[in-house]
Image: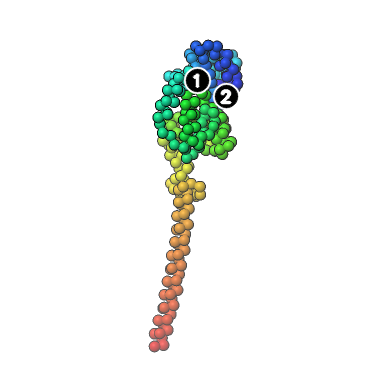
Amino acid sequence: IGLKEETVSDICRRVTTNPSKLVNIANINSPNQIVISGTTIGIEEAIILCKKEGAKRAIKLKMSVPAHSNLMLSASKKFAQVIEQVTFYDPIIPVIHNVDVSISTTAKHIKEKLIEQIFKPVKWSDTIKLMIEKGGVNNIIECGPSKVLSGLIKRIDPRVNTIDLDNYNHYLDMIRAVTGLNEARDGSTPDPNALVGVQKLAAANSNTATRHILHSALFLTSEICEALSLRISDILEYS
């Protein structure tokens, strides 16, 4: 934490003098939070150099595999053989790949990027920037029992509204915000952009129209009854 990508990348190059010290950037979580991956010896040496370069924090993370590093090349080749047997379909919604911030609209491209992701860095920061600046995204929902990504997104761009589904209440809040169930629950003014809000507005308009029709029917009935009453009165008087 606290070092730029260029500085961390340079440290990885200086440490990787042989295969036993292989280390490279694995995740670019935010402009000042970067994760590296590689051999144990390489990671330990890189941590020392990062601290010397002024890193605010540099610690080892407990991982079962050196994810997103060149040590995963052999695993990616095996994965490629497996994924080749799986049928993929072209996506309805374009898919953004955090391996290179490219956008996929074909099944073939998605397969290629899934394989590359195993041994290449995750460009999370650039991915979020693309969604915001070019995709016009201003609301991001983090699925799963965590809110780590929401925190990272706020560091990338504080203007973005994030919703984490870390607990059940957060999930309910998200449903209420998206569907407008809050208006249905507390009787507040319906949001015209919310699903329930649209239904409530339609119902309100329908009720108004129905009320006007009933009032008109009652008025006509009253006028007819009054006219009939006067007519009967005239008949009785002059009969």
User: Residue 210: x percent and y percent?
Assistant: 44, 61
Residue at point 43%, 65% (across, down):
214
Residue found at the far bottom of this picture: 239
183, 196: nearer the viewer: 196
Mark 2: few, some, or many residues within 10 Å (few <14, many ≥20)? Answer: some
15, 1: nearer the viewer: 15
Which label's residue is closer to the chain start, 1 or 2? Answer: 2
- Colour mapping: rainbow
Camera-side mark, 1 or 2: 1
Disc 2 designates what residue? 32
Residue at point 39%, 88% (across, down):
239
- Amino acid tagged 1: Ser
Query: For numbered disc 1, what is the local secondary structure?
Result: loop
Q: In the picture shown, does residue 44 fall above or below 132? A: above
Residue at point 49%, 36% (across, down):
106
93, 1: nearer the viewer: 93
User: Residue 187: x percent and y percent?
Assistant: 46, 49
Q: In the picture shown, does residue 161 fall above or below 115? A: below
Residue at point 54%, 22% (across, down):
34
Mark 1: few, some, or many residues within 10 Å (few <14, many ≥20)? Answer: many
Q: In the picture shown, does residue 186 fall above or below 24? A: below
Q: Quadrant of the N terminus?
A: top right
Query: For numbered disc 2, what is the local secondary structure?
Result: loop
Image position of 61 (left or right of 2): left
User: Residue 191: x percent and y percent?
Assistant: 50, 48
Image position of 2 (left or right of 210): right
User: Residue 150: x percent and y percent?
Assistant: 50, 31
- Tell me how far mark 1 sits from mark 2, CA to CA: 20 Å
For the residues bearing labels 1 and 2, Cβ distance under 8 angstroms: no
Disc 1 designates what residue? 69
- Amino acid tagged 2: Asn
